[in-house]
Amino acid sequence: MKQEKIHKIWSPAIECMDRAKLRELQNERLRATVKLEYENVPLYRSRMDAMGVKPEDIKTVDDLKKLPFTEKTDLRDQFPYGLLAAKLTDIVRIQGSSGTTGKPIVTGYTQNDIDVWTEMVARSLTAAGGDADDVIQVCYGYGLFTGGLGAHYGASAIGATVIPMSAGNTQRQMMMMTELGATMLCCTPSYATYLGETLKEAGLLDKVKLKSGVFGAEPWTEEMRQHLEELFDFDACDIYGLTEIGGPGVAFECLEKTGMHVNEDHVIAEIIDPETGEPLPYGQKGELVFTTITKTGMPMIRYRTHDICSIDAKPCACGRTFLKISRLTGRTDDMLVIRGVNVFPSQIETCLVGLEGVAPFYCLIVDRVNSTDKLEVQVELSDEIFTDKVSEIEELRGTIAERIKSVVGIAAKITLVAPKSLPRSEGKAKRVIDRRNLTNV
């Protein structure tokens, strides 16, 4: 059942800090981080030297643009410890990416970094209504992937009861959720959808006590939120993070659900033009770039996330003064260019979620026929509409095709498939198959 909109804040003194004081804190921490990076990371020192920049040249956040970017390829090239700014004896944890694009990377965390990460997740869970009275079921994977351990530590910090389920084994997930009385759920939005629909089919939704869910690790749409909230009758909140920056909790939604608050006392967010690298003003959509200012194991300066969003500087009704980033609309490296048109999977999802007769499962297949790109969208029918009537199927197919043409700007072949026939994912959903170069995205 959805909770009353009461804005709980884990660290009011920080999260509601006066913007001028927050900027002073950021300036101080940025100067210390640049000095730490320059003195201890040869790669970054050489890049700064090549640009003619010294640590003393960086005095305020406004000087960020003087500094070079960092890319995920740097972590791969410097694998495993080339980017550490601390001694290996001070590294207490190694975490790795989930490998959404390319092979995984690893990063080292000091105890300070673990404490900062825990604090950020505690704020995130509190913003979604969590407190010591909650039973939080964590369905993110544990291990090198930061999702499971991040949610676990944050839930423990706020005093909640934690059910460390990890990913997979849906039947057991449902049993534990209903029998142990879970009140909050942490997992990917695609798995939450699968879990909810499986509970519904089993007639168990009325036994679920969830009041909210904190979902991340993959882009998802407002339409997906509406679907989840209608399915579970709870509050679905977004959470964002990267292994390289500090795990989940770098940014999070409050119950206003108008964007994700960035934990600005720990990270600085920028939006840049992905083509030129030039900073963009608040409100303009571009590539998200983060600089860590409290991380000591492997700090990241101007790290290019390749995620597409915008920054919102308007005050939030929850009382937090942190800037907000908008919902992610995709990544610069998962964008498909089809017949000269930029296409993101999230655009297709917007067209499908909430449409009567279809389930929230789809797959984009891109191919090249006679030197021309072709887009096929496979859409799964819901149990309610699955029918042999050709007229009903054709009408629905036409509706979907029109929506996609209107939103995306190109025509697509729509293939309607039987309920539960598309692959299910208990981790990050795989939405695209690009056959033009025989590479799965």
Image (cartoon, rainbow, N blue to C red):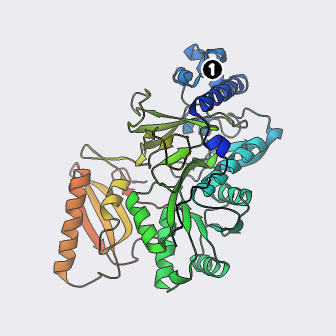
Residue, disc 1 = 46
Q: Which residue occupies the extreme top position in the image?
A: 52
Q: Is residue 61 left or right of residue 107?
A: left
Q: Residue at x 41, y 30 (%)?
A: 280
The one nearer the camera, 417 or 254, is 254
User: For residue 362, which quarter of the picture?
Assistant: bottom left
Q: Left or right: 312 with respect to 391?
A: right
Q: Closest to the observer: 131 or 242?
A: 131
Q: Decide if residue 145 is in sight here.
A: no
For this orientation, the residue located farthest to the left is 391
Image location of residue 72, percent across then percent down? 56, 39
Determine if residue 433 is in view.
yes
Element class at badge 1 = helix
Q: Position of residue 437 (x, y in %)?
A: 37, 50
Q: Residue at x 48, y 38 (%)?
A: 288
What's under tag 1, amino acid-wise?
A: Ser
Q: Residues within 10 Å of mark 1 (few under 14, many from 20)?
A: few
Q: Would you identify the image quadrant in which residue 6 lies?
A: bottom right
Q: What residue is at 57 percent from the left and 72 percent from the top?
A: 210
Q: Is residue 94 above or below residue 237?
A: above
Number of marks present in the image shown:
1
Placement of 413 over or under 396, stated as above or below: above
Say which of 10 and 148 sits in front: 10
The answer to whether residue 435 is left or right of residue 101 is: left
Q: Position of residue 111 (x, y in %)?
A: 78, 44
Q: Position of residue 428 (x, y in %)?
A: 51, 60
